[in-house]
Image (cartoon, rainbow, N blue to C red):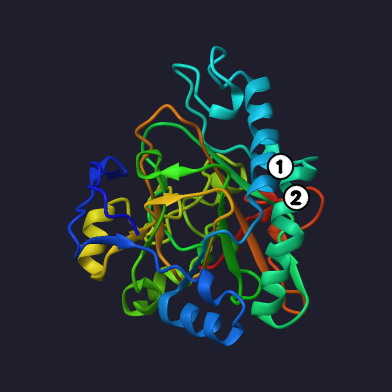
Amino acid sequence: MTTMPLPTLTARGQSLDTQPDAFGFLRDSADIVGDVDALRGRFLADGYLYLPGLLDRAEVREARRSVLERAREEGLLDPDSPAEDGLLKPGVNPYFRPEYTRDNPCLRRILYEGPMMAFFARFLGGEVRHFDYTWLRAVGPGPGTAPHCDIVYMGRGTRNLFTAWTPLGDIPLTVGGLMILENSHRRTDLTGAYLEQDVDSYCENGPNAEAVRDGKLYWEHWQRWQEPGAGWDGAFSHDPPELRTQFGGRWLTSGEYRMGDVLIFGMATLHASIDNTTNILRLSTDTRYQRADEPVDERWIGDRPIAHGIAGKKGRIC
């Protein structure tokens, strides 16, 4: 927890209330990382586990270098600064770079071997599998990720599925970073209908069916499927301050995420990101883990996962 005065923070371009009743810091669970029963109890209570230092910092730094080298080759970085600083070239603002994860043994080592996999094997009490698709975010200045729950993007397998958010660099508040809405995993009275959605599902007897099948409409809005062209991005809300007012609790984050930290949360936990107000490239990965003996969402497995492409669309009668 930080005791320093907080900078002005925004999410989706809107000012965050950083008073103590509206904003706070994640509970550190590094002290119980060896106690499986305590970890499971805390996860049920909080909807997340924040594990500073779970991964080897030097290995994470090496993975960071491998990603920044690809960003440099793509022409994203300031040519007058060291690549490891991650400073963006003026006028460049990437967001999502899953292609940087392919043929990247340094990155795979921290995400799918060693302490990460050992943790999930203990926590889940059995053999673990991970999704083959790795989400890598390379976020420049501007609005961050809107509040959402992960289940709407990957709910065709087990719901006993866990996200690990791993910063590939030290991330102070001004560079942004992930934030959790406190106790949101308990508020199924507000999220219930949303949690049953699948972004790749569409009404095959509705006005958008052909557009979805042709790839002209990426995702049909689950509440407005009767409206032609009513698209959706999977978000529960685009107004983080109002969402907090609606749910109660606080937005929780870290005063500074550091290389080696991991934040784990479940499919029903609302989360978003703080806006990046610098020219530093914010690098992080989202990876998913489950027991190997439970069903897996077919969109995210294999050498070339179909992901959210046309092959993953699933029609329903509305």
Label 2: state its secondary structure. helix
Relative horizontal placement of residue 247, taking residue 70 as reference (left or right): left
* Quadrant assignment, res 278: top left
* Quadrant assignment, res 313: bottom right
Percent from the top left, x then y, of residue 94? 52, 30
Q: Are marks 2 and 1 in contact (CB under 8 Å)?
A: yes
Q: Is residue 309 visible?
A: no
Which residue type does callout 2 highlight?
Arg
Which residue type does callout 1 highlight?
Thr
Query: Viewer-proximal residue, 96 or 117?
Result: 117
- The residue depicted at 59 percent of the width and 53 percent of the height is 260
- The residue depicted at 39 percent of the width and 64 percent of the height is 26
Gap between marks 2 and 1 measured at Cα:
8 Å
Image quadrant occupied by the N terminus = bottom left
Q: Is residue 166 above or below residue 32?
A: above
What is the tally of numbered marks visible in this picture?
Answer: 2
Percent from the top left, x then y, of residue 300? 70, 57
Residue 293 - label: none
Q: Is residue 195 visible?
A: yes
Q: Sort mark 1 into few (<14), some (14-19) or many (20+) by Cα contacts within 10 Å.
A: many
Query: If you read the primary sequence from the N terminus, does the residue marked by circle 2 or circle 1 appear first?
Result: 1
Percent from the top left, x then y, of residue 21? 19, 65
Residue 108 - label: 2
- The residue depicted at 40 percent of the width and 31 percent of the height is 141
Percent from the top left, x then y, of residue 85? 54, 28
- The residue depicted at 32 percent of the width and 51 percent of the height is 238
The residue beneath circle 1 is 101
